[in-house]
Image (cartoon, rainbow, N blue to C red):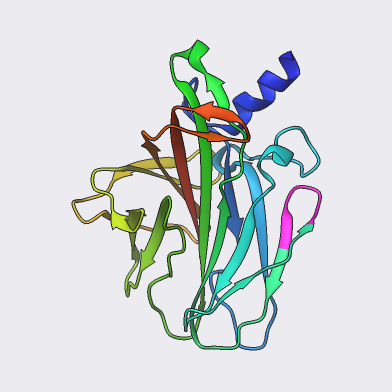
Amino acid sequence: MKKFIATLLLITLPVLSASAHYLWIETNGTGALGQTQEVRVHYGEYTYGVIEKVEGEAFPLVSKFTLWVIAPDGTKTELGKKAKEDHYLASFTPSQKGVYTIALNNNEIDVIDYTQYDFGIFKTHYHSTAKVQVGADGDTKTANPNGIVVKQLKNDGEEIKLQVLYKGEPIAKNELKVYVSDLWSKTLCTDDNGEVSFALPWDTQYIVETTTKEEMPGTYNGEDYEFIWHCATYCIKR
């Protein structure tokens, strides 16, 4: 029982500490027509260098995710995935010029009881996205009408502009964290349009995370919950 509780503490939100595990996608930010594009799905805490093993204690609890690629014309194709040591691997081959959006969704995570920590009983919903640019730039697509998603808007400078949407609508004054490796992070807040801009000073990978709480009780797998905790991540690779 102690081992099970410790695993649950790893997979959820920052109730007891300043950080928490999350799912994220890694892929090159640019692609080419006719060339295979690899996509990796990790679970852990990127900025702390924590990457869970696929067959470890924590990753199996969040492994029931679906992975899609959305083409520039809006065509949505599910990607098959293979389990590796510390990630799931998928791939696709771009056939159109423009922006491809990789989208992961996981709304199949067991209910967790945190009443002993004064937080309540909740269900978790993860969503992750990443952008692959093939030629012309543009906005990424969104594919999470029941939760939170980070959308990258077209930009032409050193700053990147993102928009956070919740159930299809911009979410204002929502906290957003930007992570790189080696323990660097920055906390921002969306404006009234759900938008936020920031510079990318290093040629590295950035992971963006944002969350929101949906006060909607329900039942999942026979277990009642009081609310849903939504978590979205977005990968930027320069």
Residue reaching furthest left?
192
**Residue 72 visible in image:** yes
Left or right position of 25 against 63: left
Residue closest to the eye, 89 or 158: 89
Residue 159 locus on image (x, y percent): 32, 63
Q: Residue at x 24, y 48 (%)?
A: 172
Q: In the rendered image, which quarter contains the N terminus?
A: top right
Please report the bounds of the magenta region as a residue range.
Answer: 83-89
Q: Quadrant of residue 145?
A: bottom left
Q: Is 87 inside the magenta-drawn segment?
A: yes
147 w.r.t. 152: above or below: above
Q: Quadrant of residue 165?
A: bottom left
Residue closest to the eye, 38 or 169: 169
Residue 190 locus on image (x, y percent): 26, 49
Q: Residue at x 61, y 83 (%)?
A: 94
Q: Is 185 inside the magenta-drawn segment?
A: no
Residue closest to the eye, 97 or 122: 122
